Amino acid sequence: MAEMLNAIIARGGTTALTNAVTPGTLAHWMATPGAIWHLAENDRGALQGFQWVEPKSGLPADMLDIATFTRIGATGLGIGSALFERTKDAAKEQGARAINATIRADNQGGLTYYQSRGFEPYARQDNVNLGGGLIVGRVMMRYEL
């Protein structure tokens, strides 16, 4: 998972993450209380993507925050759609009423993905410093469960 995510981070342009992650970092994230993770593999068992939701400070208690990553070269194959079907069902079972997605304003693919799932924009932040001098806008989108 770290290898796949680090390739996305290194390519840039689609994630707010700017520093490489380690397997330990991912294990720590996965252990977050209330976090729900789903993985997508191909028929040979190779990781194609992953998605998770988790509680996040600043959001209402009944809203989870989402992150989605698909292997470079594997976008547009329905991986994100399949992941979201599982994630939204699990979020409902956990008692969430909504899911928040915060997307870089310059990430057209991410904005399109979440909009196509039924997320609706509700806020925007401009001039967000992601580190290393990278300043972007962010769009917050909400999905009602």
Image: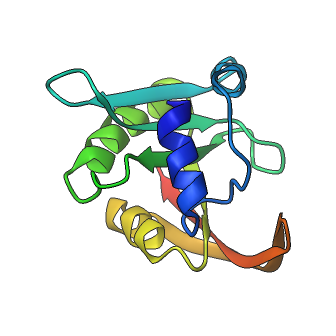
Residue 40: give x, y in percent of width and height.
Answer: 31, 32
Left or right? Give the position of 20 relative to 100.
right
Q: Place residue 44 in its image quadrant.
A: top left
* Of the pair 38 and 97, the residue shown nearer to us: 38
Residue 75: give x, y in percent of width and height.
Answer: 29, 56
Most extreme residue toward the left, as rendered? Answer: 43
Left or right? Give the position of 11 relative to 77.
right
Q: Is residue 97 visible?
A: no
Left or right? Give the position of 34 relative to 2.
right
In the image, what residue occupies the spot 46% across and 24% down?
Answer: 93
In the image, what residue occupies the spot 75% across and 41% down?
Answer: 56
Reply above or below: 4 against 135.
Answer: above
* Of the pair 33 and 103, the residue shown nearer to us: 103
Q: Can residue 7 be seen in this view?
A: yes
Query: Which color scheme is applied?
Result: rainbow
Left or right? Give the position of 67 relative to 80.
right
In the image, what residue occupies the spot 51% across and 35% down?
Answer: 3
* Of the pair 56 and 6, the residue shown nearer to us: 6
Residue 35: give x, y in percent of width and height.
Answer: 62, 26
Query: How many numbered badges does the structure rendering display?
Result: 0
Reply above or below: 82 against 39.
Answer: below
Reply above or below: 69 against 93.
Answer: below
* Of the pair 78 and 59, the residue shown nearer to us: 78
In the image, what residue occupies the spot 50% across and 27% down?
Answer: 37
